[in-house]
Amino acid sequence: MAGDELDALFREVQDALREATQHVVLVRGTDEAARPFWAFVAMRADRWEAFRARTGGGDLADYGTILASGFGDGPPPAEVERMRQEFGYRPVDP
């Protein structure tokens, strides 16, 4: 295989991994009525940058699968533990 073919194959594999890899993230914000909310979203790595680049608003489902959500400043501890157990959620310190 020539160098260009290897580079192309490597890019294909990287793209496939990016599309297949999902991370569970905890999103916090406010809804249209200014109520605080939280949501756990399973998001593909290739959608993460688009999510971070948004300027607010929009539908979280456009970026991933909503696994759990609710109103308030944050999820209850039992929900955080469920996300850890079922989906491998790992909190990230800011």
Image (tube, rainbow, N blue to C red):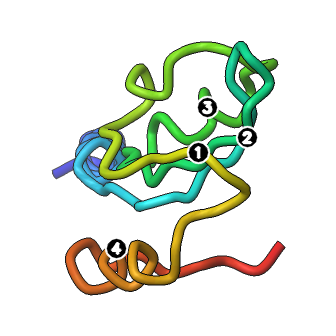
Residue 69 in the image: state x and y as whole percent: 44, 47
Residue 60 in the image: state x and y as whole percent: 49, 28
Residue, disc 3: 51
Residue 47 in the image: state x and y as whole percent: 47, 34
Q: Earlier in the sequence, mark 4 or mark 2?
A: 2
Q: Earlier in the sequence, mark 1 or mark 2?
A: 2
Calculate the distance from the C-alpha at mark 4 to the C-alpha at mark 3: 20 Å
Pair 1/4: label in front: 1
Residue drawn at x 81%, y 18% is 55
Residue, disc 2: 36
The three-letter amino acid code for the residue at tag 2 is: Pro
Residue, disc 1: 71
| 57 relative to 87 in the view: left or right | right
Please, what secondary structure does the residue beneath circle 3 have?
A: helix
Residue 8 in the image: state x and y as whole percent: 31, 39
Q: Earlier in the sequence, mark 4 or mark 3?
A: 3
Residue, disc 4: 83
The three-letter amino acid code for the residue at tag 3 is: Phe
Please, what secondary structure does the residue beneath circle 1 have?
A: strand
